Amino acid sequence: MTKNEEKSAAPFVPATTSIKALRAAADECRGCDLYKTATQVVFGAGPRRARVLFVGEQPGDQEDRQGEPFVGPAGALLDKALADAGISRDDVYLTNAVKHFKWEPRGKRRIHKKPRASEVKACRPWLEAELRAVQPAIVVCLGATAAQSVLGSTFKLMRQRGAVVSSALAPRVVATIHPSAVLRAPDSEGRRAAFGMLVADLKVVAKLLK
């Protein structure tokens, strides 16, 4: 086995379009080393035929503990943004480019650590399998890591966010900021501006769904 083959989830991904079977198989994934320090795999969740598939970067601390995507503070903020944009949660499947939480200790806290490009690439077969299973009309990338995973390393999030583009993975893709970027804004004015940006981009998605 070559070094590149060692760093891929591909051997662990079954040939199925059953989300339930994919999720069960993901528990056994050893496609990269992130499983060693994560509590559990955090697979995607949502309706089997969701019209929109959202891709974030990776699970956070709460997601890692609960085993579900977008259940922490960023998920709560995404729910509010979806409501403000007029997108029903019943139309949405949520997942991440990387399925295990990458973190570093800071005191008693586990702080998010950005996954390496090689880790995103290793996990990509899971995202491809989810896209084949769900077949969404639109893919929404939350943040630069997710956008570059779907649209390539040259994609510039802040320059191209809110635009409808196509990729080999999906015919219609919209990239926007990750809800955690809103939470990280330094003050209330910054958070308000970032949230407005997120909602504006999601309104583009809502219009496509009509």
Image: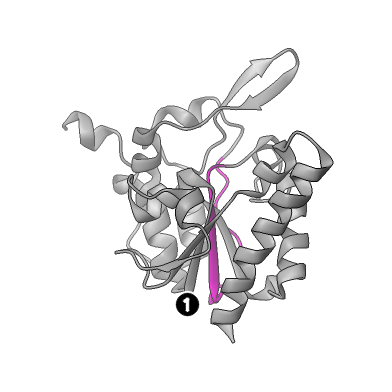
Quadrant hosting residue 102:
top right
Magenta-span inclusion, residue 52: yes
Q: Residues within 10 Å of mark 1 (few under 14, many from 20)?
A: some
Nearest the eye: 175 or 138: 175
The span picked out in magenta is: 41-58
Q: Which residue is mark 1?
A: 137
Q: How is the image coloured?
A: one colour
In the picture shown, does residue 46 fall above or below 116? below
In the picture shown, does residue 48 fall above or below 94? below
Residue ID at (29%, 64%): 168
Which amino acid, mark 1? Ala
Give x and y (percent) for residue 56. 55, 50
Nearest the eye: 55 or 174: 174
Residue ID at (71%, 71%): 85
Question: Residue 71 vs residue 162: left or right?
Answer: right
Nearest the eye: 80 or 5: 80
User: For the stretch drawn in magenta, what is the main secondary structure?
Assistant: loop
Give x and y (percent) for residue 16. 37, 66
Residue ID at (30%, 34%): 7
Give x and y (percent) for residue 91. 63, 75
> How many badges with numbers are in the image?
1
In the picture shown, does residue 201 fall above or below 144? below
